[in-house]
Amino acid sequence: MDFVKIGSEKVPVIGIGTWGMGGWFSRDTSHDNECIDAIRTAVKLGITHIDTAEIYGNGHAEEIVGKAIRGIPRKKLFITTKVAKNHLHYNDVINSARKSMKRMNIKYIDMYLIHWPNPKVPLKETMKAMDFLVEKRLVRFIGVSNFSSKLLREAQSYAKNRIAANQVEYNLLKRDAEKNLLGYCQKNGILLTAYQPLALGKLAHKGFRPFDEICLKYNKTQAQVALNWLISKQNVIAIPKASARHVKENLGALGWKIRKEDAVKLERYFWKFGFISSFAGRPVRFLKDCIIRILPEKYLGKFEGFYDRTIEKISKLEKRIFAR
């Protein structure tokens, strides 16, 4: 297993995400056993970084994590969870952390992230609560998610403790983080944690000819090459959601490094796909962002199917235009 350091702590460069485990924005227990198996398989194979959040499955994802890690020595694990954007007032942050620990049956959280910024709540108030959690040893490291470099600087100016990580969407198709954020994080020793590293599965399948050729060259799957491209970058780790079978596949992204010329070839090739995704998908993503920011989380699940179907249609359009 390859690692990066957060302070003196070694963290695997590939973790396992739990978005969708236990439901989207509402509780769903129909696949609990499969989810538990995936997490246990990951830990058994050395993927000991588990990423979750209080809003995943309305808390049920954290309950699944708690069941999956039962009997595993706590010090062997690195658990990240996130406080929801509507829980960012001082007391709410602390209460959310305690509830997350209770759901997972743990005594401390390794890394606690602000899931989304909320302009309605003073960031200074939120960071004060995050510092309190560290002071009381309920949280070891603090971080943020979906923050711009400007917001990241502001958050750090209010915090006594160093911000350890910023979790953002980052993959071959979505590289907005490279504009300002990645460089800022690398310069300041902040871990950039990539969610949706396989672009909702689009980067895990054959059909993009130049991509497929590079995969054949390294004798790797599409998912393995896409993940390796990410983790080959300084201070970047990937958090894919995976079944037990895919957890084993993801390990094939480790132990080698894509050559610079091949990485550049992939970046140039997928740039046009990212452009189409950005252009065609912008109205849908804009709608989703608005919904996330306005509606209570319990109503958001209704929109996930629409969003996923639309993005899937955009993906098919991309392949028809460019894959040949």
Image (spheres, rainbow, N blue to C red):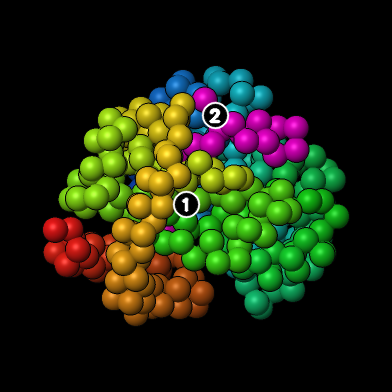
Is residue 196 visible in the rendered image? The answer is: no
Is residue 272 visible in the rendered image? The answer is: yes
Q: Residue at x 59, y 57 (%)?
A: 182
Q: How many residues crowd mark 1 within 10 Å: few (<14), some (14–19), many (20+)?
A: many
Q: Nearer the viewer, residue 65 or 150?
A: 150
Q: Which mark is residue 38?
A: none
Residue furthest to the front in view is 261
- Marks 1/2 in contact by CB < 8 Å: the verdict is no
Q: Nearer the viewer, residue 49 or 104?
A: 49
Q: Which mark is residue 2?
A: 2
Q: Element at badge 2?
A: loop
Judge whether 127 appears above or below 243 on screen.
Answer: below
**Which quadrant would the C terminus be assigned to in this image?**
bottom left
Q: On the rendered structure, is 304 left or right of 162?
A: left
Amino acid residing under circle 1: Tyr
Q: Nearer the viewer, residue 314 or 59?
A: 314
Q: Residue at x 18, y 58 (%)?
A: 323
Q: Start and end of the magenta stretch?
A: 1-25
Q: Position of residue 210 (x, y in %)?
A: 24, 50
Q: Which residue is mark 1?
A: 195
Magenta span: chief secondary structure? loop
Q: On the rendered structure, is 186 left or right of 172?
A: right
Count of labels in the image = 2
Residue 288, picture quadrant? bottom left
Q: Position of residue 205 (x, y in %)?
A: 23, 46
Judge whether 298 appears above or below 250 on screen.
Answer: below
Q: Residue at x 23, y 44 (%)?
A: 212
User: Quick check: is 19 in the magenta stretch?
Assistant: yes
